[in-house]
Every structure is written in structure tokens, then in C-alpha cells.
Image (cartoon, rainbow, N blue to C red):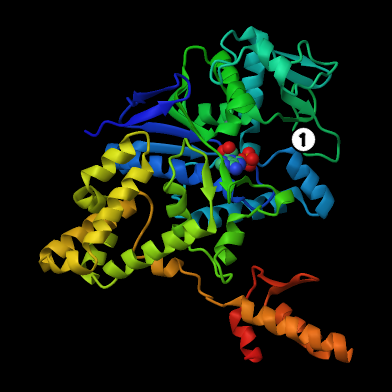
Amino acid sequence: MTTIKLHNTKSRKKEVFTPLDPENVRMYVCGPTVYDRAHLGNARPVVVFDVLYRLLRHVYGPDHVTYVRNFTDVDDKINARAAESGRSIGEITSETTQWFLDDMGALGALEPDEMPRATQYIPQMVAMIEDLIAKGHAYAKEGHVLFRVRSYTDYGKLSGRSVDDMIAGARVEVAPFKEDPMDFVLWKPSSDDLPGWDSPWGRGRPGWHIECSAMAYELLGESFDIHGGGNDLMFPHHENEIAQSCCAHPEGGFAQVWMHNEMLQVEGKKMSKSLGNFFTVHDLLLRGMPGNIGVPGPVIRFVFLSTHYRKPMDWRQSFAVHAKQRLDIWSSEVAFSKHIRKEFEDDIDSFVLKYVDKEVVDALSDDLNTSLAITHLISLGKLLEGAPRRQLSSDEVEHVQKRLIAGCALIGINLFEYEDALPCFEVDFSNWEAQLIEARELAMQSKDFAEVDRLKTVFKNAGLEVRMSKEGVELFPGPDFDPAKLEALK
Ligand code: AMP
Ligand code: ZN
């Protein structure tokens, strides 16, 4: 059997991965808070842990892996969004949850086996909090319940900090109901206008960290194999999860291996709204390429996987252009092999088992070295081009095609479906934008804005948002964008 090695944040070493139960390998990854579209950074852990999920299924069998990723659907950011938009919390969370699943599906992410929502596990959270109080690790005060951090001597081990350093460096909230500034909230009171559940401490709602401990325990047990998330979650979220779970279930070990992905940046800079380089996944899928066409989901995945998950990664449009060129070639190399496609689609897992190169599996098994796996796939792809291809018999060509298809499938890229992922509207918006600018310039002289208004109306009716400023004009397709409605302008 393939040996998988994973870097464990807990030991700061790459270790041989030995599942607690090879019949049921268990992984938990912290999921999104559902109040808005996922930004590009949010997609990184999804893609990284999707590759790990695929590798585990490949090595242990698809029926022997359980992957859980939660949805945080109770949170103050959601409450604030509801208050400012006048919409109900349920409407916002269910819409955002579906957006997340659609966007991540476009990136080729398999759905986890379980996707628990926090609001479905309130009784389990209350039970865990009661247990923590009974064991002396938590206390109730003024409608709040707090975790007593000093009662857990291993607190801070994951991120390698001492409690005293954390107090000195962190923005810890000092509150009159806290015994110690480091203590964190397990439960807090809710006013009538906020979501709340009855509890032994009055009507209230959970703190953020307790949901992952309660849901991981319910769905994976007191010990499981892998826990993942972005490295921004290591402290305090993951430290708090460990403290809660290990104190409530001291007989279990909670997660054996902790894995953290590094952050994503855009064109060399931290992604932020103020720098104007903040993208949602949806934005990129709709118009992230030069010429304002959409970036196909598999291209986004390819760019992500070209950097190792423990290194900061940079999103650059030029990387997407190169990745697209490569995937365009690969998919066209295999597109006409109807019988290979049939064999592939009949049973993708068996196809991968049969044809994937050992180099790809070995690279992924070495702490998810996706960039090395891609380097190998690039050398395979080259065999199918021009002169090298002419030196191969047709059987040999077919074999290389199968190895390439299988290798791509293991990293979550389906070359046969790639064509379907290409943006359906390869519209070059710059022509329409230029037309509007010209009309505006004429109107400035003639003072007759009828043509400008007509164009704006056509764009709006086609589902485009028109942004006009002194610098120029930009058109943004909204969710209802219908390029057919632009025909009238031609
Ligand atoms: P949040 O919704 O902010 O709790 O984040 C959801 C997930 O996205 C977490 O696993 C974060 O670590 C991850 N994440 C957030 N921002 C980035 C980023 N810029 N790069 C990579 N991962 C990120
Ligand atoms: Zn979590």
C-alpha cells in the first residue's frame, strides 16, 4: 500500500500517516461562515483538502473515508448582514450555502460526506458545555459560559505559544464576567431580536469554537485522523477546539494530524477590499480573464495546485492564462477518444487506479506535493504533442492519454468535462465598453444623451451592471447575464 506522509502542525514534522482505522479514515475541515460569496482565499482550503480527500479515497478505497466540513450558520456577521439588508437570517444562510456549493463545485471539489450546519447541533453543543462545566473546565456567569483556559495545561501547544505570551500579544477581550482574560466564550445570551435557543443558562447562542468540537465528536468520534483549515485558524480557533474536545473527552485524542494551508495573495499583495484586488470565486468564474471572459473552474484549480499548500500562493491573471493554454491543449488531445471516455466515465475511481502514474501518487503522498504531480503531468502531456507523438504507435499514444486523464482526475480535473467548464459567453466586453464611451463623448458635445441612455438600457436588460466614471466604463455581468440580449447592438 502507498505510504502517505503529511506535515503535522502539532509536531511540526512530516510524519508517516497511519489511520486509526483504515476501514474508516476520518477528516474534519473547518468550513465557511455563510453570509456572503466565498472569496478566492476561502477556496484554497477547499481545493487543498479536496485533493487530500481524493488521495485518501484512492489509497484506502472510496467507501473507507469520511470527510466532514461544516457550515457556520450562526454568527454575528450573519446577524449584522440580516439587520443591514432587512432579509431574514434563514434566507441569507441558505442562499449563501448554495452559492458556496455551486462555486466550489465549479472548481471540481467533491462534496464532503457530511456537511453539518451549526444550527442543527445546538443540543449537542449544550450537552458538551454542560459536561465541561461539570468537569471544572468551564463556568457560567451572567448568562455567559466561559472556558477556563488555565484548566487545560496543554493550551497553546498547537500554535507553539504560552498562555502568558498570548495574553501579551493577542487582542483578548477583558470582560467583567471573565475569571481570566484568556477565557473564551462557549455560550452567550441573545436579546429578543437575535437568534437564540433555550439553555440551562437562559436564552442564548453558542460561541464559534464549540460547534466544531461538538460536530466532530458527533460525526467522527472522540478521536479521528486529520483536522484541516487555513493557518489563520490555528489560533485561537483550533487551540480552542482542542481545549474543548480534549477536556470533554480526555480518553480520546481529538485529531491526530493537524494540517494548515498558507494564505492566498493576489498579484503579490494581500487580498483586500481597500486595495481593489478582492475577488470572489464567482467574480473570477464570470470575468476573471483578460478580455473579461470567465476563468474556467479547472483553470483556477490548476493555478492553486501549482503551489504547495504550505507556501503562500499568488493568484495572477498571467498564471491563469498559462494554465488555460495548457488545459486547452490537454483536453483537445483527449477529446476525441470516445472509447477512453466511456471507460473513464463508467467508473472513474477504477480508471484512476488502473492508469495513474506512480509518480503522481507518490508526489501527492509526499505531503500533497501537487506542484511535483503537475510537473509530471506536463511531461506526459508533452509526449502527446508534435514530434514526440509521431514517434509513438497509436497504442502508445492511447496509453499516454489514459495516464494523463487519470493523473488529472486524481487532482480533481476531469479533462472530458473541461470543455463544459469553458465560459459559455466568450464575449469581449471591451467592444461594448468602447461603444458606450464613444456615445458618451458625442453626447458631451451635442448634449443629446439619448444614445447613451439607449445603450445603458440594453446593457441593463442583458443583465450587465454598468459602471461609468471619469476613467472609463466597465460592464459587469450579473447572475442573470444573457449575452443573446446584446445581439440587438450588433
Ligand atoms: P472564514 O470564512 O474567514 O472563516 O474562512 C474560511 C476558510 O478560508 C478558513 O479555512 C480560512 O483559513 C480560509 N481562508 C480565509 N482567507 C484565506 C486566504 N487569503 N488564503 C487562504 N485561505 C484563506
Ligand atoms: Zn473549526
Residue 234 position (above or below residue 480): above
Q: Is 40 situated left or right of 74 in this image? A: left
Q: Is residue 133 visible?
A: no
Task: Name the image quarter holding residue 459.
Answer: bottom right
Residue 342 on image: x %, y %: 25, 66
Q: Within 8 Å of ligand 2, the CB of disc 1? A: no
Amino acid type, residue under disc 1 in the picture: Gly
Q: Secondary structure at mark 1?
A: loop
Image quarter where ligand 1 lies: top right
- Residue at 66%, 81% (x, y): give it: 432
Q: Nearer the viewer, residue 345 or 165?
A: 165
Q: Nearer the viewer, residue 102 or 136?
A: 102
Q: Is 44 situated left or right of 481 in this image? A: left
Residue 25 position (above or below residue 402): above
- Residue at 36%, 49% (x, y): give it: 411
Residue 226 on image: x %, y %: 44, 29
Residue tagged by mark 1?
196
Quarter of the picture holding the C terminus: bottom right
Residue 173 on image: x %, y %: 79, 22
Quarter of the picture holding the N terminus: top left
- Mark 1 is surrounded, within 10 Å at the Cα level, by few (under 14), some (14 to 19) or many (20 or more) other residues, namely some
Q: Is 83 situated left or right of 255 in this image? A: right
- Residue at 70%, 54% (x, y): give it: 276
Q: Is residue 324 visible?
A: yes
- Residue at 40%, 44% (x, y): give it: 51
